[in-house]
Amino acid sequence: MSELKLPARSEDFSEWYNQLVLRAELADYAPVRGCMIVRPYGWALWENIQQALDRRFKATGHVNAAFPLLIPRSFIEKEKSHVAGFSPELAVVTVGGGEKLEEPLVIRPTSETIIGHAYAKWIQSYRDLPLLINQWNSVVRWELRTKLFLRTLEFYWQEGHTAHATFEEAEAETRQMLNIYTDFAATDAAVPVIPGRKSESERFAGADQTYSIEAMMGDGKALQAGTSHNLGQNFAKAFEIRYLDKNGTLQYCWTTSWGLSTRFIGAIIMVHGDDQGLILPPRLAPFQVVIVPIFKSDEEKARVMEAARKIRAALVAADIRTKMDEREGVSPGFKFNDWEMRGVPLRLEIGPKDVAKDTVVLARRDKPGKEGKSFVPQEGLPSAVNKTLSEIQTALYERALAFREANTQDPKDYAEFKAAVETGFAFSFWCGRAKCEEQIKEETKATMRCIPLDQPGGEGRCICCGQPAKEKAIFGRAY
Ligand SMILES: [Zn+2]
């Protein structure tokens, strides 16, 4: 546990991250290289992410279902750019039940093809549209360079798949889901993100248009934290997803897909964490409050524990996720450090003096030392705790936004651009040509993250070639 200090975040961000994930008990390495074991504390965080998203999906008319893990290999080959994009990352099953399979099966890298196959059966008429289905599952992509949560062979996510009668409806759905991700990130995870459009070279294999949310991590690098794709009629044509319109004419559907994965946990760690460890946003934290009882004698223990249990019951009754640390043989100081490392937003200390005064001490994780401490009456504690949690939630978002703004430059020329992407984002005019995008990538290691939906307007000159440009794009080095 927290006997040893973590490497300083400012000195070795990557090692700080790796050790934090292990020591906060979020995840562990698996026997197969590149796989990940999500530990209970990490899974509890993921469950809270799931709930926050699932609620939004259902509020916009989506339902959940489960499609198979195994997909006939021929399915993947039906959509030309899809197969080109995913072939290098496929895990293929060739033997089943001791027999060589007639047709190899792939373990789903994503489910457009198998869902497309089902949709072709289920959709006949315009009355069957739109079809709005999501699934919570895991997928496998044979990645070469892996890092816990950020890139693993198998990862958990949700994948939404919808079919519509018109291009406009599919586009509206794609944008709606991007907005849902943006809102979830800001409201629940306190992670400010930039919603935007991907360039052609960064599009999902088989999509006409890909949108993403991009976030700045604590080291100034970018993380793509969720994507939403307008698949046009590509999969509809490959899988014969058709419907009879009101005039009795057979039409191809327009489909979308959208996903957000356990990668987002990596974003939460890298956006909010500090040298002491994790800082979890209260709305997603598995434990929002940890109670640390403080006593020396048995007599003190009896009094303190009685008060602490009452407090715990009152907080739980108010739907506040509360953990009581009753570990024996461990000092309060050790417990403080341990829960700080695990990012619990609010610590509640209670000792004999507090019991006598009917108060407790609240210590905010986001504000170290005296600044974050307050003495609060036990009476009305749940509402005081809720108020503090909501202040922490807001403070985390504002701090992350201020950091991103301070590290996003609007460079005057290419030299300034090169310097800007060393430490953060550059927000620059881009002519839209793949050649410039490629050159920037080669010379600066920065990629075009997205063309933000929110544009300042006006025209400028491409930061790379100097040709007239209509749109500004976010460039940065990415995870
Ligand atoms: Zn250019």
Image (spheres, grey):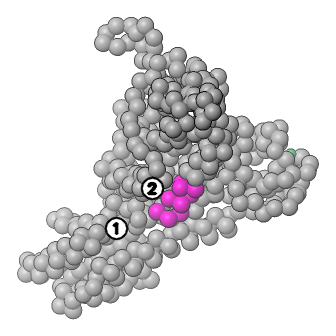
Q: Position of residue 343 (x, y in %)?
A: 39, 63
Residue 399 visible, this orientation: yes
Q: Secondary structure at mark 1?
A: loop
Q: Secondary structure at mark 2?
A: helix
Q: Quadrant of residue 48?
A: bottom left
Q: Position of residue 113 (x, y in %)?
A: 52, 27
* Left or right: 278 in relation to 354: right
* Left or right: 311 in relation to 428: left
Closest to the observer: 91 or 121? 121
Marks counted in the figure total: 2
Q: Earlier in the sequence, mark 2 or mark 1?
A: 2
Prevalent SS, magenta region: helix
The residue most toward the bottom is 357
Q: Quadrant of residue 207?
A: top right
- Give the residue type that dot 1 points to: Gln
The residue tagged 1 is 288
Contact flag, marks 2 and 1 (Cβ < 8 Å): no
Q: Quadrant of residue 354?
A: bottom left
Q: Position of residue 185 (x, y in %)?
A: 52, 59
Q: Position of residue 189 (x, y in %)?
A: 48, 61
**What are the residue bounds of the magenta stretch?**
178-188
Q: Residue at x 30, y 69 (%)?
A: 320
The residue tagged 2 is 59
Distance from disc 2 to disc 1, alpha carbons, whole Å, reads 26 Å
Q: Residues within 10 Å of mark 1 (few under 14, many from 20)?
A: many
- Give the residue type that dot 2 points to: Ala
The residue most toward the front is 247
For residue 396, above or below residue 152: below
Q: Residue at x 64, y 22 (%)?
A: 80
Which mark, residue 476? none
* Left or right: 185 in relation to 387: right
Quadrant of image for the N terminus: bottom left
